Every structure is written in C-alpha cells, then in structure tokens.
Amino acid sequence: MLLKKSADIKSSEITPKNLYLNRRRFLAGTAIAGAAALAGLELGEAVSPSTVAHANTKIEGLQKSPFSTTEKITPYKDVTTYNNYYEFSTDKDGPSRLAGNFKTRPWNVTIDGLVQKKQVLDVDSIIKMAPAEERIYRHRCVEGWSIVVPWVGFSLSELIKRAQPTSKAKFVEFTTLLDMKQMPGQRRDVLQWPYVEGLRMDEAMHPLALLCFGMYGEALPNQDGAPLRLVVPWKYGFKSAKAIVRIRFTDSQPRNTWNISAPTEYGFYSNVNPNVDHPRWSQAKERRLGEFFKRPTLMFNGYDQVASLYSGMDLKKNF
Ligand SMILES: Nc1nc2c(c(=O)[nH]1)N[C@H]1C(S)=C(S)[C@@H](COP(=O)(O)O)O[C@H]1N2
Ligand SMILES: [Mo]
C-alpha cells in the first residue's frame, strides 16, 4: 500500500525523480536552513521539501526513519475506520462517518505560555519547519487494541526548539479544537471539552515524540487527527491528541482530559506497561487490529530507549 515495489518502477521514473528530490533536500537541508539561521528567521519561515494540502494528497520527499519498526503495517482501512475520537463519536466507526466535512484549512496553532516566541502559526508553516519523515510506529490503545502505522511528521522537538521555551517551562500542554458545530460529540458531556493532553518537557523533547500530519504517505484523514496531531508511541493512545490548536508551555503538570474524567483509571504518564493493570482489566496483552490471537504487550510498547526518562520513578504510582 505504501510504496511501489522497486521492480514496479521503471528506471526512467527513478532517476529523474531521485535527482530532483535529492536536489530539493539538499537545498532544504543546507542552503535554506543555513540562510534561515543567518537571517534569524522566526518559527516556521524556513522551507522544506514536503507539501501537504488535503487528505489523500500525497506527501512528497519523505525521509525514512531509523525509529521505524519492520513489523507488518496494519491495513489502511482498519486504521481509518476503527478510531477513538470522542469529539465526533464514542463508536469506533463514528469518526470515519462523521468527520468527512471537518474543515482543516485554514488552521491556526497558538504557541504560548513560558516561551520566548509566543505566536500564532498557520498549520502549513508548521508542516514546513522540518523535512517530513515516515515513522512506522506501534501504537497501543489503553483499551487493548494496537496498530502499526506509517505516520508522517517530524520530531516535536523541532517545533519546541524554535519556540524557545524559557528555563521555567517544565511541561507542554496540547489542546484540541473546540467547535460544537463541527464536532457533534462535543454537544455531549462524555468528556470535558476541549480535549487536553500534556507531556513533561523531557518526554516532549524525546526524538520519538512525533508531531504528525500524515500517514500512509498522504495527508492525515480527518478521523485520525487532521491537520495536526501528536503520536507518542511509548504511551497509551489517549496521550496522542488530535486536531491540535494550542501548544502551551507551563511550569506545572497539566491536567489531562482522561485524568479529569477518571483519575483512578488514567494517570498523567500513561506509559504502556504490561505490569500495571487498568483497574477494570489487564494490560498484559493486546490485539492487533485485523488479527485474531492476542500478543503480549511490551514495556514502553517496546520503545526501551525512553526508559531512562523514568529512572528512579515508581511506575505503579506514576501510572
Ligand atoms: N482530540 C482527541 N484526541 C484523541 C482522542 C480523542 O477522543 N480526542 N482519542 C485518543 C485515543 S484514546 C486514541 S487510542 C488515539 C486513536 O488514534 P487513531 O484513531 O488515529 O488510531 O487518539 C487519541 N487522541
Ligand atoms: Mo485509546
């Protein structure tokens, strides 16, 4: 689904396109980034090779990532019709049915709180901040299902660096759009709206934390969080907020929506952890969408490289 097999590509297609992309990458990576640095340009003014418009729009010039898993990718159909997105519906197939007309352009994101560069940015200027990568991540929902998705984006740290948080900033808070007219689920009190999530600064700066605007080589479908979402692969899915409109830097731990809703069931950290059960069910196993047999869940969802962020912490208390 993702890439044509190399055997399917005519050599006449390969050469010019590769040359073209390499040249653009070269320009983006050196000349433009260098010029931007020299000129002291603001957040989002540098140019990169990727362009994104509407869903089903191909994203060109994707870079591969060493963080990608080689596990089997979950079919696009499953990932786009089995969603958690309570702003639209609490049914898994609701978001795909109800988010079709959701307006993702124009779209502004407010960057504020404890940063030197407070500003309101157009989402397309955010997308152009850094070269787009494909990151094939495992993604596990707290309810016990999991998927493997080729997300598109770049490390959240790219945006944070440019925002220049002050030394007082210890956490980052992410807020989803509040718009009852477009998001029918917000007319019900199933959660406190708008949806809010948060990360500790060192978690947010970890290169695995992905600022995501596409998947399967295309712009994000609305039901998966267009135009801009987070993907934090070592944490349960609910930490990965969709349709982000605000990124705020704070000195105290943000209260996240699911923790407000059920504090004994959903903590702030929410690291994937097979040894800490949800009060109402075990977290030891998971079922990949499209598969029958369950598989064991791995500590940090298998992303051991984040373990040092939590050394000395009791992960049963800090669930
Ligand atoms: N704004 C918002 N973000 C959200 C949610 C939500 O209801 N609203 N659900 C979360 C949960 S519980 C999961 S598992 C993932 C699902 O992402 P996916 O539908 O792309 O698989 O989105 C997360 N982000
Ligand atoms: Mo979830």
Image (cartoon, helix red, strand yellow):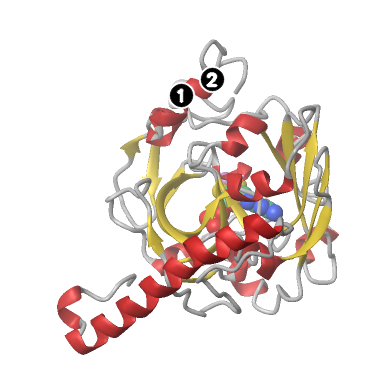
Q: Return the x and y of residue 21 as percentages of the image width and height.
A: 39, 75
**Which residue position holds label 2?**
310
Q: Is residue 142 left or right of 189 when viewed as pictured?
A: left
**Alpha carbon of mark 2 to alpha carbon of mark 1: how far?**
6 Å
Please name the residue shown 77% across and 31% down the image: 169
Q: Give the percent coordinates (x, y) of residue 258.
A: 71, 38
- Residue farthest toward the front in the current orientation of the protein: 38
Looking at the image, residue 231 lies above or below residue 78: above
> Is residue 264 or residue 137 the one in the foreground?
137
In-image side of 250 versus 35 (left or right): right
In the displayed structure, 139 sits above or below 85; it is above
- Quick one: SS at disc 2? helix
- Residue 16, by quadrant, is bottom left
Lateral position of residue 307 relative to residue 180, left or right: left
User: Residue 18 — which label?
Assistant: none
Q: Which element is circle 1 on?
A: helix
Judged from this view, the residue extending furthest toward the left is 7
For label 1, the crowd category at 10 Å Cα-Cα, with few meaning under 14, some 14 to 19 and many 20 or more, is few
Amino acid carrying label 1: it is Ala
- In the image, what residue type sits under mark 2? Tyr
Neighbours of disc 2 within 10 Å: few (<14), some (14-19), many (20+): few
Do labels 2 and 1 touch, CB within 8 Å?
yes
Please state which of residues 319 and 68 is positioned toward the viewer in this rendering: 68
Front residue of 260 and 6: 6
**Residue in view at x 61 percent, y 30 percent:** 202
Residue under numbered circle 1: 307
Say whether residue 42 is left or right of residue 151.
Answer: right
Q: Is residue 158 above or below residue 272?
A: below
Q: Dividing the picture into quarters, in which one does residue 196 lie? A: top right
- Whole-percent x, y for residue 207 in the image: 50, 41
What is the total number of numbered labels drawn onto the structure image?
A: 2
